[in-house]
Amino acid sequence: MSVAIESLFTKALGLQAPWSVKEVELDTTRRRIDFTLTCDAKQLPCPLCQTPDQGIHDRLKREWRHLDFFQFEAWLHAEVPRIGCSACAKTTQVEVPWAREGSGFTALFEALALSLCQELPVRQAAALLRCQDKQLWRRIKHYVGEARKLDDMSDVKLIGIDDTSLHKGQSYITVVHDLNAKRLLFACEGRDHQTVIDFAADLKAHGGEPKQIEHVCQDMSAAYAKGVGMAFPQAQISYDRFHVIAMAHEAMDEVRREETSTQPKAIKEALGDNDRKLLKSLTWGMRKNPDDWSVKQTHAMHWLQHSTLKSARAWRLKVALRAVYANAVQSNDAQQATKELSAWISWARRCRLEPFKKLAKTLNQKLDAVVRGMLDNRSNAYVEAMNGLLQQAKRAARGFRNVTYFISIAYLRMSKLKHLPANPLLPALPKTNVFIHRCL
Ligand SMILES: [Zn+2]
């Protein structure tokens, strides 16, 4: 090709002396464009000790996948000099400006890949880029690690701690979020108190101090409470609303299951029907909000409410606890919420339903922390931070059952990291100094 084309690509690839494009080869049948780059320096500084003007020992052939050039897959090839240094007596390969050490992709290709992985499942991104998903996973881990080194946690005050698992029955992962900034701060395997202590160490490593944490939202697990007590003794704990309501659902299901197996006749009589499907409608009707009931569920729930079944009492208790929470969100008044919750607890204690008596006892023991979980929109902030993106990250990691990689993609998507490479396809250049090449 002409010299003009080579100099055009030298500029387009952002190369500077001593590097330039020596040869461009376009293969339309293979849909491939190959650039041969050359370094015309005779002497270079030693990459290790920076001593200038050292001789080139030899050159090693290497290649890199680059961003596609229109419909053509682009590859860069170069013989990379190794410097024989007279000062430190070592032989070291020079760094090339378009790729990081040891990577077979250019930095721009990696940046594009990373941007795609923020939006698409990794396997799909790999298919689009025509590479292996394993190659992308390794890079996600690398760049996330680099970006997290520079992450700043110095203004975190309100955190949420929860556990999740990649697949049912698999080992647990603890996730810690900044509930104000709504971003993932930390994730690690396990869900014991040590995970909270590990987070405190990570916070310190990122410019934070444990004493700056004023508030922790969490489930009622004793392990997290123990960890918070050890690592953040001055922080107030609040028990998240969604976990408390889930406990009420569990208590209600327990009552219904027990009654269905020991008193099947009473249930059938109350529902006035032997239809097995009606029993199923009852199960779901009890779990759902009345607004979401189907016709059959409305029917089953109508009969339930007119019965003297234990299940009916259990359902009323569950609904009443939800109402206590809804009122607290409305009033955002600690005194009022404490009063209403205490009234619910004393009802549940006298209800002669073992699972609810147990729940009432638990809530009473942690009354202040449960009430704190009702206020200041903390529970909603908690769920917003914890759920949606985490599910997305799980989908992104589908087909790759590796906890380390899952944690990396969770950081990539949920941590709002500021030091990731930017997407090369977004216009980032100022409009001045634009290089225009006109083929006349
Ligand atoms: Zn040297």
Image: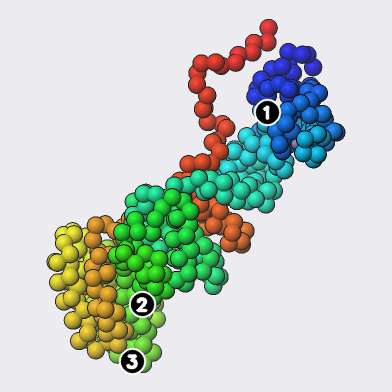
User: Residue 263, labelled with which disc?
Assistant: 3
* Residue 237: percent from left, percent from top: 31, 66
Label 3 sits on what residue type? Answer: Gln
Q: Residue at x 61, y 41 (%)?
A: 113
Q: Are marks 1 and 2 in contact (CB under 8 Å)?
A: no
Q: Is residue 409 left or right of residue 291?
A: right
Of residue 104 and residue 360, the one placed in the foreground of this image is 104
User: Residue 250, labelled with which disc?
Assistant: 2
* Residue 403: percent from left, percent from top: 58, 62
Q: CA distance from mark 1 to mark 3?
A: 73 Å
Going from the N terminus, do you reach mark 1 or mark 2 first? 1
Label 1 sits on what residue type? Answer: Phe
| Outermost residue, right side | 58
Q: Residue at x 63, y 51 (%)?
A: 137
Q: Dot 1 lies on which element?
A: strand
For mark 1, what is the residue? 69
Of residue 435 and residue 357, the one placed in the foreground of this image is 435
